[in-house]
Amino acid sequence: MKTKLWIIGAIILIPIIAHIIYAIAVSPTMNYYLTVDEFIARSANAPARVGGTIVPGSIKWDNATQTMRFQIAGSGNAVIAIAYRGRVPDAFRDSVTAIVEGARARDGEFSATTLMIKCPHQYLPAGF
């Protein structure tokens, strides 16, 4: 009788555990953000979180609209133009990794609602 209960329990639990592991493994939240190349490959204008390196010299402040405009680049030649209105992080500057949340606007520019800067792997004091 005990063996039969163990077999029935295994038949019930193994698929449940396998499903949970599969659901966790393919969860969209596992990827913290899309790369620039992945975002460009998508045709949908759905909200997304995209990360890339800020293109040197691309940061522009528009006083008239109170909008920060800049570009982020992927690993190849892919570049996305970003428009952001809001508080800019202290570490925001050329060549750092920025992560933006928002959606592609009708004009093709990415309209960001959130701007974050990825922390460096190593802390260095100012001047180094």
Image (spheres, rainbow, N blue to C red):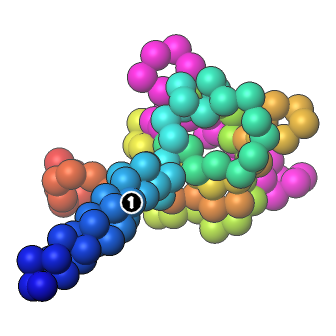
Residue 21 placement (x, y as % from top left): 32, 59
In magenta, the rendered stretch is: 52-78
Residue 73 lies in magenta, yes or no? yes
Kindly identify the amino acid type of the residue bearing the numbered disc 1: His
Residue 119 placement (x, y as % from top left): 32, 57
Q: Residue at x 71, y 60 (%)?
A: 113
Res 80 → quadrant: top right
87, 8: nearer the viewer: 8
Residue 45 placement (x, y as % from top left): 78, 40
Q: For the view shown, which residue lies furthest in the bottom direction?
A: 1
Marker count (numbered): 1
Q: Which residue is mark 1?
A: 19
Left or right: residue 81 versus residue 66 is left
Q: Residue at x 62, y 24 (%)?
A: 41
Q: Residue at x 81, y 58 (%)?
A: 66
43, 13: nearer the viewer: 13
- Quarter of the image where the N terminus is located: bottom left
Residue 47 placement (x, y as % from top left): 71, 51
Residue 31 can be seen in this image: yes
Res 18 → quadrant: bottom left
Q: For the view shown, which residue lies furthest in the top direction?
A: 77
124, 74: nearer the viewer: 74
- Label 1 Cα neighbours within 10 Å, binned few <14 / some 14-19 / many ≥20: few
Residue 57 can be seen in this image: no
Q: For the view shown, which residue lies furthest in the front direction?
A: 1
Q: Residue at x 18, y 71 (%)?
A: 7
Residue 88 lies in magenta, yes or no? no
Left or right: residue 88 versus residue 2 is right
Indicate whether 29 appears above or below 98: below
